[in-house]
Amino acid sequence: MLLGKIIGTVVATRKEPELSGLRMMLVQELNSSFEAAGKIIVAVDAVGAGQGEVVLFASGSSARQTAITNNRPVDHVIMAVVDLVTTGGETRYDKSTDAG
């Protein structure tokens, strides 16, 4: 799993039937300091994530192992909204105090 931040949505009115009903979001990969780093990807939202939220997402074949993405042509899936990250007893990220 990777850390990312929701930076937008993707709307596609014409698509393969297997993608119908899936909510697609733009996700900016984050580094260990929670700063934008890496690619911006399109991920299917399996958990109801919102704009500006920090999320965990999976790529590749792992992206097709959620209930809503099983056997669908998906390369990235948002599988969790992050509330808190700590390392060594120190808070690195806290959703309740993040400015967005």
Image (cartoon, rainbow, N blue to C red):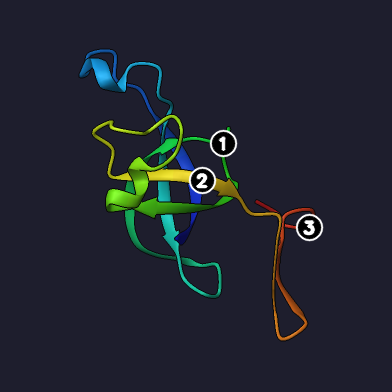
How many neighbours does mark 3 have within 10 angstroms: few (below 14), some (14-19), or many (20 or more)? few
Q: Which numbered tag is attached to residue 79?
A: 2
Residue drawn at (40%, 43%), measured in percent from left and top?
77
Residue at 50% from the left image edge and 35% from the top image edge: 46
Residue 19 in the image, given as x and y percentages of width and height: 30, 22
Q: Which amino acid does label 3 sit on?
A: Thr
Check disc 2: other Cα within 10 Å, few if <14, some if 14-19, many if 20+: many
Residue 61 lies, in percent from the top left, at: 28, 50
Q: How many labels does the image show?
A: 3
Which element carries disc 3, helix, strand or loop? loop
Q: Residue at x 42, y 47 (%)?
A: 27
Reply above or below: 67 against 41: above
Relative to 99, is 52 above or below?
above
Q: Which amino acid does label 1 sit on?
A: Val
Measure the alpha-carbon separation of dots 1 and 3.
21 Å
Q: Name the residue under label 3.
A: 97
Q: What element carries label 1?
A: loop
For marks 1 and 3, the one nearer the N-term is: 1
Pair 1/3: label in front: 1
| Sequence-earlier tag: 2 or 3 | 2
- Residue position marked by numbered label 1 in the rendering: 47
* Quadrant of the image occupied by residue 87: bottom right
Residue at 40% over, 24% down: 22
